[in-house]
Image: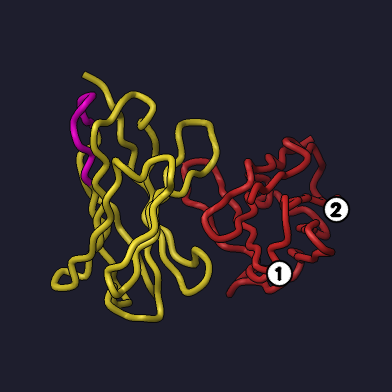
Chain colours: A red, B yellow
Amino acid sequence: IVLTQSPATLSLSPGERATLSCRASQSVSNYLAWYQQKPGQAPRLLISDASNRATGIPARFTGSWSGTDFTLTISSLEPEDFAVYFCQHLNTFGQGTKLEIK
Amino acid sequence: QVQLQESGPGLVKPSETLSLTCTVSGGSVSSGSYFWSWIRQPPGKGLEWLGFLYSSGSTNYNPSLKSRVTLSLDTSKNQFSLKLTSVTAADTAVYYCAGGTYYFDYWGQGTLVTVSS
């Protein structure tokens, strides 16, 4: 299975809405997670099973999916949200989307 | 809260064996509730899964590394380990230990291993 994330880089301003995509090359049901990684830190689990927020994750992070297309939406960007985001299914990671400040 | 901590040499010579240990606290490596794993990230690049390790001791390895990688449990020390043989410069990366129930809920802070003579 290949996970393809888009875009590679997303430039937005605080307060804006971010939409990150992850497409699976074949069906993974809803067995997909999203992680956030800040510079010098380990990834942190945000979303499991495509739409379930992990403990302590703010409500502005929402996961959704349709078929093999998965979306992570951040409703209103906070300064601490600018990071790299990875999707994951079993032993496969997407290549990441860098969310940077515009 | 489960916490993980990697330890091991930060510099390994080409052709030698990279050995890292992950110490688990707040949970048991022998618990059937968890799986354990090693993931690496070359500088400025993405995440590469190396293998899974289960409380039974069974393993799954990345096919691209299968002949070089070994994961093992030490239940007496509540640790699990990674050995990667015949390393080259391409194995230079931050190595993370991770674990969870169905996803990678828990991560170590990562340790940079450089392969250089």
Residue A50: image x %, image y %? 71, 67
Q: Is residue B64 above or below residue A18?
A: above
Chain letter of the residue beneath label 2 in the structure image: A
Chain letter of the residue beneath label 1 in the structure image: A
Residue B57: image x %, image y %? 27, 69
User: What distance separates the C-alpha of mark 1 from that of mark 2?
Assistant: 23 Å
Q: Quadrant of residue A70?
A: bottom right
Write down the region rendered in magenta: B11-19
Tell whether B72 sits left or right of B93: left
Are there few (<14), some (14-19), or many (20+) residues within 10 Å of tag 1?
Answer: some
**Residue matched to label 2:** A17
Residue sitting at x 28%, y 55%: B71
Tell me which numbered mark, 1 or 2, is placed earlier along the sequence: 2
Residue sitting at x 23%, y 54%: B21
Q: Quadrant of the C terminus of chain A?
A: top right
**Residue matched to label 1:** A30
